Image (cartoon, grey):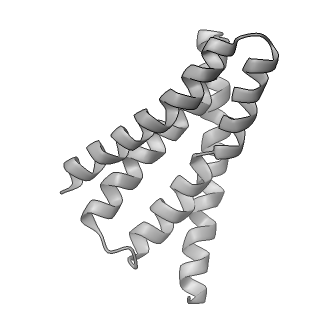
Amino acid sequence: MTIARVALVAFGAALGAPTRWWVDVYVQRRWLAVFPLGTFAVNVAGSLLLGFLVAGWSTESAAVALLGIGFCGALTTFSSFAWESHRLAEDGARGLAAANVVGTPIVCCAAAALGWWIGS
């Protein structure tokens, strides 16, 4: 691992984390949904982009370090997904919690596969 690769990952993450926050706030304000649409949106978008990137570039490339590991890694969020699913269940929205827990990984894997297909 080189310093340049670490810098690419860090720069990508510095862009991905605020993008995640902005998208989440924007989506939640626009649709005022109980379901965590913002987190769902960033996870699906990040999966699509990552699938696209790894289909077209070597995992050792600068583009994958910057956009895949850095940006997509910071854009997507398992911790918010888990916490929001737990919160939904605690608040009595067990059906939405279950839909989130089951649906998010399925849709994200499908998005990654679609990204791979587009990038191939």
Q: Identify the residue shown where x is 52% and y is 29%.
A: 102
- Measuring from the top left, give residue 64's x and y in whole percent: 42, 68
Residue extending furthest toward the right: 90
Depth check: give the residue in front, 83 or 50: 83
- Measuring from the top left, give residue 47's x and y in whole percent: 43, 46
- Residue 35 visible in the current orientation: no
Depth check: give the residue in front, 107 or 24: 107
81 relative to 116, above or below: above
Q: Identify the residue shown where x is 75% and y is 34%.
A: 83
- Residue 119 visible in the current orientation: yes
Does 57 sit left or right of 45 as displayed?
left
- Measuring from the top left, give residue 2's x and y in whole percent: 56, 89
Q: Identify the residue shown where x is 70% and y is 37%.
A: 82
If the image is split into quadrants, where does the N terminus sit?
A: bottom right
24 relative to 58, above or below: above
- Measuring from the top left, give residue 53's x and y in whole percent: 34, 59
Q: Identify the residue shown where x is 58% and y is 25%.
A: 100
Residue extending furthest toward the bottom: 2
Depth check: give the residue in front, 99 or 66: 99
